Image (tube, helix red, strand yellow):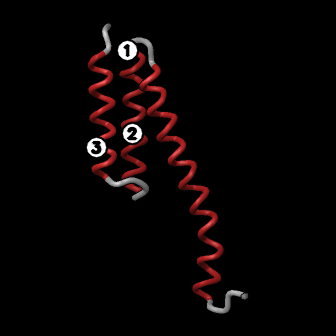
Amino acid sequence: MPLRHKSAQKRARQTPKRTERNKLYKARVKSAVKKVLSAKTKDAAEKELRNAVSVLDKVAAKGLIHRNNAANRKSSLTLHVNKLAK
């Protein structure tokens, strides 16, 4: 059935664009977190942590993840980095 309402037509145009954009942001979060967890030295992990915190804050500001979810992830990453030996 064709979309007859203007608002439904606009939604049909917007939804795929937003879905793709959201996928990119979530992929950035996942890769940033993986980089922190896979860092070998504490210095490298701290550098990656700063990047991951920035990405998490941006994604939370856009509403893709809840701000508490971002805070919990930042906290767990910080604990992981602090446990690493220099």
Q: Earlier in the sequence, mark 1 or mark 3?
A: 1
Q: Quadrant of the C terminus?
A: top left
Figure quadrant of residue 43: top left
Compared to 50, does 21 lie above or below? Answer: below
Mark 2 touches mark 3? (CB < 8 Å)? no
Q: Earlier in the sequence, mark 2 or mark 3?
A: 2
In the image, taking residue 19 as reference, residue 60 lies left or right, namely left
Q: Amino acid at mark 3?
A: Ala
Residue 36 in picture, x, y percent from top left: 42, 26
Q: Which residue is mark 1?
A: 43
Q: Which residue is mark 2?
A: 54
The residue located at (57%, 63%) in the rendering is 18
**Dot in front, 2 or 3:** 3
Crowdedness near tag 1: few (<14), some (14–19) or many (≥20) residues, C-alpha within 10 Å: some
Crowdedness near tag 3: few (<14), some (14–19) or many (≥20) residues, C-alpha within 10 Å: some
- Residue farthest to the right? 2
Compared to 30, does 69 lie above or below? Answer: below
Q: Amino acid at mark 2?
A: Ser
The CA distance from mark 1 to mark 3 is: 22 Å
Q: Quadrant of the N terminus?
A: bottom right
In the image, taking residue 49 as reference, residue 71 lies left or right, namely left
Residue 32 in picture, x, y percent from top left: 47, 33
The residue located at (43%, 41%) in the rendering is 55
Q: Which residue is mark 3?
A: 71
Mark 1 touches mark 3? (CB < 8 Å)? no
Compared to 18, does 28 lie above or below? Answer: above
